[in-house]
Image (tube, grey):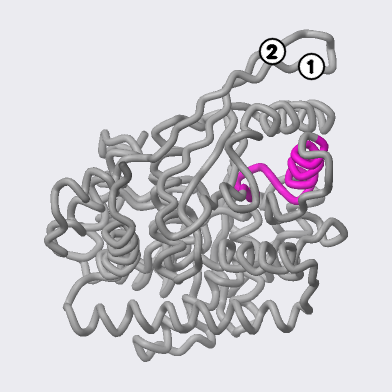
């Protein structure tokens, strides 16, 4: 938990409380908006490779489906908690509404350390988890996807397990699958690519030159790597990156492809030739044009927000900034582009994969990227124009659009019974 002494779910509710007050949302409707529709906790006994039986805990939170089937990733991490999963599920609801795709929000997670597990153990835990939640998911009910420490292989196991239970192949039950099993072109790169597109649009709107602008990226996993590579191709200067082991800095600029190759060889970005070693905390406080936190949540808090020297923050991770930190950053004149807009590229291409699967089609990378680009540019423009008109910050504006669309759907549907 951050130095703000607030759990992730309380932080997410606090953001919606601000939004609801600005939009004059009825208190009863506010309670519906912050309350998950269904919460599932499952016990996962697994026989480990050494013959020992361990029992893991899994979660699946289905927040709201007023606008369509639940949608959200599944993360495997030793610090996964119900509060975290609930906050992320809520964020998915607003994210899908903000970019106007017909999904609601969900999230899942298993409390485990995959770095200490064999591939066989990861398969067993995935298949057990899928079996336990199989009655609650489905192509028109809830469509899971990869998240932290899960990937295309994880989704292949989930798809196969669900399909065996149903008695026929159901590729559309999950997204983020391998290409050969119905996965979409461009899905693996989509979240990071989307972060880069949103950063580019932000630079345009602020009148900042993208070429040679300095970028710091916290987190060098899937999102951070693909954001770095895309931004590098756009002419940005990547001056600092980090992973769970540490951070590196080079004011002249890093080649993200070479840094990634180094990480694959050594297990970390640390020790990359010509770079200076930093802590993750020092990396966040580097002077730069753009800071892209793409690691865990609650990284920019009351404790360090006053030390942030970036001109713009583009949130690649989910919930990297606390409510209290938001206020400090805004007071210091730092523009923050929130996660529900900045990292929405992943769920956009997940939606495209789902559509392809339902229709048993496969689109080219060019087609997918064109649709991704069009959707993100349009969504960004909606937020920016409303921000300018209403005088709100980017997070409040994004939430106003996303929450407003969900609230409208709930009002139109009514309450049954």
SS for callout 1: loop
Q: Quadrant of the C terminus?
A: top left
Residue for badge 1: 48
- For this rendering, which residue is in front, 401 or 131? 131
Q: Answer with left or right where residue 258 lies relative to residue 329.
A: right
Instruction: Count residues near mark 1 (Cα–Cα under 10 Å), then give few for <14, some for 14-19, many for 20+.
Output: some
Cβ–Cβ under 8 Å for marks 1 and 2:
yes
Q: Position of residue 252 (x, y in %)?
A: 58, 74
Name the dominant secondary structure of the magenta segment. Answer: helix
Q: Where does the N terminus fall, quadrant-wise?
A: top left
Q: Position of residue 27 (x, y in %)?
A: 14, 48
Q: Quadrant of residue 291?
A: bottom left
Work out how far the residue at label 1 is from the one at label 2, CA to CA, in angstroms. Answer: 7 Å
The image shows residue 29, relative to residue 396, as above or below, that is above
The dot on residue 54 is 2
Task: Check the image and name the residue furthest to the top.
Answer: 52
> Considering depth in this image, is 382 or 167 the residue closer to the camera?
167
- Examine the rendered structure and indicate whether residue 338 appears above or below residue 8: below
The disc at residue 2 is none
**Is residue 150 within the magenta segment?**
yes
Which region of the structure is painted magenta? Answer: 144-164
**Who comes first in sequence, dot 1 or dot 2?**
1
Q: Residue at 44% across / 51% down in the picture?
A: 65
State which quadrant residue 391 falls in.
bottom left
Q: Position of residue 313 (x, y in %)?
A: 39, 66
Q: Magenta segment: does it hold 332?
A: no
State left or right for residue 309 relative to residue 221: left
Q: How many marks?
A: 2
Is residue 271 visible in the rendered structure shown here?
Answer: no
> Relative to the observer, which residue lies in front, 399 or 4?
399
Question: Between 327 and 240, which is closer to the camera in this rendering?
Answer: 327
Where residue 251 appears, as percent x and y from the top left, is 53, 70
């Amino acid at each position: 938990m951050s130095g703000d002494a607030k759990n992730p779910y309380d932080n997410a509710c606090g953001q919606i409380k601000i939004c609801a007050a600005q939009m004059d949302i009825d208190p009863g409707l506010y309670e519906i908006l912050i309350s998950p529709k269904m919460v599932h906790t499952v016990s996962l006994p697994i026989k480990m490779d050494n013959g020992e039986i361990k029992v893991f805990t899994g979660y699946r939170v289905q927040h709201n489906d007023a606008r369509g089937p639940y949608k959200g990733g599944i993360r495997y991490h030793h610090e996964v908690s119900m509060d975290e999963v609930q906050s992320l599920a809520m964020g998915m609801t607003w994210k899908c509404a903000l970019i106007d795709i017909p999904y609601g929000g969900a999230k899942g997670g298993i409390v485990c350390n995959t770095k200490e597990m064999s591939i066989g153990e990861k398969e067993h835990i995935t298949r057990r988890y899928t079996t336990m939640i199989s009655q609650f998911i489905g192509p028109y009910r809830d469509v899971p996807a990869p998240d932290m420490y899960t990937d295309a292989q994880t989704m292949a196991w989930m798809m196969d397990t669900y399909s065996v239970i149903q008695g026929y192949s159901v590729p559309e039950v999950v997204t983020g699958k391998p290409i050969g099993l119905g996965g979409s072109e461009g899905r693996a790169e989509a979240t990071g690519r989307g972060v880069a597109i949103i950063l580019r649009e932000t630079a345009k709107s602020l009148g900042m030159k993208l070429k040679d602008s300095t970028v710091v990226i916290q987190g060098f996993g899937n999102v951070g790597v693909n954001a770095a590579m895309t931004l590098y191709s756009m002419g940005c200067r990547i001056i600092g990156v980090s992973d769970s082991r540490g951070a590196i800095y080079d004011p002249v600029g890093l080649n993200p492809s070479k840094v990634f190759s180094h990480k694959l060889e050594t297990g970390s970005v640390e020790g990359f030739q010509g770079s200076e070693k930093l802590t993750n905390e020092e990396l966040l406080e580097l002077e730069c044009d753009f800071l892209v936190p793409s690691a865990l949540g609650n990284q920019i808090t009351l404790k360090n927000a006053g030390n942030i020297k970036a001109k713009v923050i583009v949130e690649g991770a989910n919930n990297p900034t606390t409510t209290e930190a938001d206020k400090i950053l805004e007071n210091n004149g730092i523009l923050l582009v929130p996660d529900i807009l900045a990292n929405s590229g992943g769920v956009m291409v997940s939606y495209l994969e789902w559509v392809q699967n339902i229709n048993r089609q496969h689109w080219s990378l060019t087609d997918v990227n064109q649709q991704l680009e069009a959707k993100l540019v349009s969504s960004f423009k909606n937020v920016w124009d409303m921000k300018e008109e209403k005088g709100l910050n980017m997070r409040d504006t994004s939430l106003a659009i996303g929450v407003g669309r969900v609230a409208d759907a709930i009002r139109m549907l009514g309450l049954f019974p």
